[in-house]
Amino acid sequence: MSELSYYDIDRCSFEDVFNDHGKIDSVIHMATCYGRKDESISDVFNANTVFPLGLLKAASVYGTDTFINTDTILPRYVNSYALSKRHFQEWGKHFAKTGNIRFVNIRLEHMYGPGDDDTKFPSHVIRSCLKNVPELKFTAGKQERDFIYIDDVVSAYSVLLKEGELKRTLYQEYDLGCGQSVTIREFVETVHRITGSTTVLKFGLLPYRKYEIMRSRINIRGLRELGWSPQVGLAQGIRHCLDAEKVR
């Protein structure tokens, strides 16, 4: 394995990075700002549109073959996060049309895994149940979501990096999830059961958010045709998260 290099992008330019390394075959963009920590709309836009656009431009100029972008399955007008992500996806299409770089757009479902931020719903529920907080309040929990474990996400990106079929088309898009949805309530109750938590679960006390998505359904046939398939079931993934929390 080659030695890793780290850069503080606030102190150097994208051009500095590409000049240091010569030709970079592929770029995987996974940075994001959800806007859950009181960031302004301009902060969200800069993180999800302006920042990756600068990276994409530099990659195109310096001869990078493939840019793999991490997008969201959310409709564009749900919130500023989704809208900013869609803006960058459109820029990716534009760059692909120029023929200078291949743009692969990954519409990622609800990823979860050890060490994730507490602002993420799965991590919040898992840690709260482990700590046996007195109670957790939820909506009715009828929203359907596709939860995918981090290891399956990594394996999908690995397949995309190695797949020669991608070279035939300059713009491609793939949905990435398990291909099966469960309700929010099912997810919470599964965590509660596996942890043996004493936390009282109170469903129906919170209203659904404005523009709430009740059904999140994706089609992972494209990735399956490349030889990828999810390997970690929901209960197994939750147990992996619990094991990691116990050694923190």
Image (cartoon, rainbow, N blue to C red):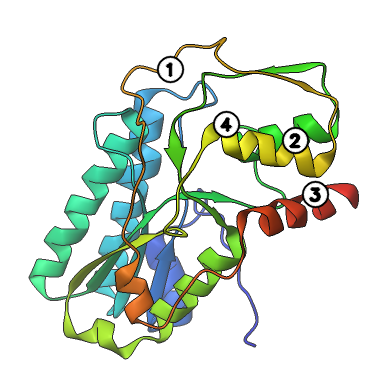
* The one of 49 and 199 positioned closer to us in this rendering: 199
- Amino acid type of the residue that numbered disc 4 sits on in the rendered structure: Arg
In the rendered image, which quarter is residue 87 located in? top left
Front residue (pair 39, 122): 122
Q: Which residue is mark 3?
A: 242
Amino acid bearing label 3: Leu
Picture coordinates of residue 147, whole percent (x, y): 52, 49
- Report the front residue among 20 and 241: 241
Q: Quadrant of the N terminus?
A: bottom right
Q: Nearer the viewer, mark 3 or mark 2?
A: 2
Badge number at residue 185: 4
**Residue 102 placement, left or right of 38:** left
Q: CA distance from mark 4 to mark 2?
A: 10 Å
Q: Residue placed at 53% from the left, 12% from the top? A: 206
Crowd around label 2: few <14 · some 14–19 · many ≥20 (10 Å):
many
Q: Is residue 120 visible?
A: no
Circle number at residue 208:
1
Closer to the N terminus: mark 4 or mark 3?
4
The image quadrant of residue 15 is: bottom left
Residue drawn where x is 70% and y is 59% of the image: 236
* Residue 246 sits above or below residue 14 on the image: above
- Is 9 above or below relative to 49? below
Counting residues from the start of the chain, the first of labels 4 and 1 encountered is 4
- Camera-nearest label, 4 or 1: 4
Q: CA distance from mark 4 to mark 3?
A: 19 Å
CB of mark 3 within 8 Å of CB of mark 1? no
Residue beneath disc 2: 192
Decide if residue 186 is on the left or right side of residue 12.
right
